[in-house]
Image: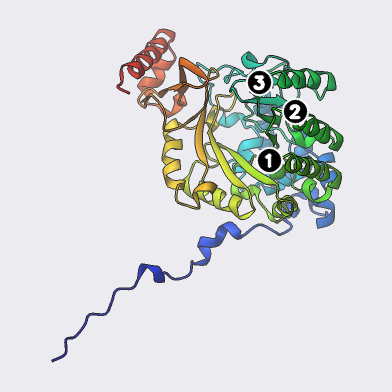
Amino acid sequence: MSQVREPAAASPALRPPAVPAALSHQDLRDDDFWRQLPGYRGLSAAEFQDYRFQSRNAVTSVAKLQEVVGDLVPASFYQDVSQGILRSTMSLRLSPYILSLIDWQHPVEDPLRLQFLPLASRWVPDHPELALDSLHEQEHSPVPGLTHRYADRALFLALDTCPVYCRFCTRSYAVGLDTPKVEKMHFGASSERWEQAFAYIAAHPELEDIVVSGGDVYNLRPEQIEYIGSTLLAMDNIRRLRFATKGPAVVPQKLVGDHEWTGALLRVVERSRQLHKAVALHTHFNHPNEITAITRQGLDRLAEQGVVVRNQCVLQRGVNDQPATMQLLVKRLSFVNVQPYYVFVHDMVKGVEELRTPLQTAIDLEKQVRGTTAGFHTPTFVLDTMGGGGKRDVHSYEYYDRKHGIAVFTSPTVRPGAQFLYFDPVHTLSPQVQQRWQDGGERAAMMRAALDEAVARPR
């Protein structure tokens, strides 16, 4: 007598193809999105996507902003921006590309507006422990514009200007024009200053890795890119260069149309291969909406020549602090051949406390992002410690007092024996704790208790 067999359960290996929504990271915007703005309504794709148009028509004042955006927003919005700029450490400079990608039906909540246009109505008081150069970059600068914190690598600030100015810039003490809040320490593109940096680098054989930043290397002339690159690569001790730029995120058209600049970068990369060294481009996308079809077109030029491109993202409240947004950003970056490298917990920067998140947000996000894609395309979530301890994994704290918003880190390879603090935004804490933070004595007591607890905990 034959037995009746139960139907076999479907094999997990026989999973159905992904639904279209799972492929949303591949949907890059390719419409005439700039036509939503009255100031750009009559521009053809060829005109708008010209990198020279993007550079020459950067929005640098509220009057220019109003000229472009017109009556899409009320007069009160422009007044809000004007008052916000007075409290900002960064001057206003926005590319037409980024301006056009803002949702002007809901600009207050838009993740791109949040990064570039300050609103006084959203201002939150700075943390009581905030300092202008919170990472102590100047303290570790043996010559102007060079930071030597880690033993084998240094940060070379080649210039102090950028194609756009981010509200949250860590180097607001030096980058961009002076503002009502900050008189800047400027690092112009000076060959005399560069030579001092080169001499220091050549005299320190332990230096093998140089980050060329600023400011933004997008603003260097092609011959300056080649000069800096060839000079550093010619040093026997230098094995790796990283050119840092936000350019692909804010003016991707330059990668497409500025053949001289891109060509200079490609020649430096090719020279590095001949010398068996490595050159990479490090860029800065914070939200998936910044990546469009023109972005991919520009990055494809680099991919065709085998240029390694990595991304360093800044975690920001309302921009990318939700798991779905960060997952989409990671997937979309991977799709356009950009390796998600770091997600930085927001540094303590004047005037942008509204954008900072608690450390716990980064810890939770890392768990949600891991497994989204391959491990080598999964970013490391890090915190650049206040006081110059360098980058630490967000999970590596010695102690985290979530009630009072104080985390304690150590940095054995950079500053052995030292302790470094990070503070959650005060406005995210309970009303009782917020009140304690306003009292200098209470503040000191909370920090001392956290430091003592970190030492007392078993290793």
Give the percent coordinates (x, y) of residue 108.
59, 40
Q: Tags 1 and 3 in contact by the CB under 8 Å rule?
A: no
Instruction: Give the residue at mark 1.
Output: 280
In terms of image quadrants, where is residue 388?
A: top right
Residue at 54% x, 21% y is 126
Picture layout, residue 215 above or below residue 333: above
Q: Between marks 2 and 1, how big is the CA–CA gap?
A: 17 Å
- Could you tell me the amino acid type at mark 2? Met
* Residue 220 seen by the camera: no
Q: Quadrant of the C terminus?
A: top left
The secondary element bearing badge 1 is classed as: strand
Q: Between marks 2 and 3, how big is the CA–CA gap?
A: 18 Å
Q: Residues within 10 Å of mark 1 (few under 14, many from 20)?
A: many
Give the percent coordinates (x, y) of residue 443.
41, 13
Instruction: Give the residue at mark 2.
Output: 235
Q: Earlier in the sequence, mark 1 or mark 3?
A: 3
- Could you tell me the amino acid type at mark 1? Ala
Q: Between marks 1 and 3, how big is the CA–CA gap?
A: 19 Å
Q: Quadrant of the N terminus?
A: bottom left
- Left or right: 384 as drawn, with respect to 236: left
- Left or right: 250 as drawn, with respect to 427: right
- Could you tell me the amino acid type at mark 3? Thr
Residue most extreme to the bottom: 1
Q: Earlier in the sequence, mark 2 or mark 3?
A: 3
Q: Nearer the viewer, mark 2 or mark 3?
A: 2
In terms of image quadrants, where is residue 445?
A: top left
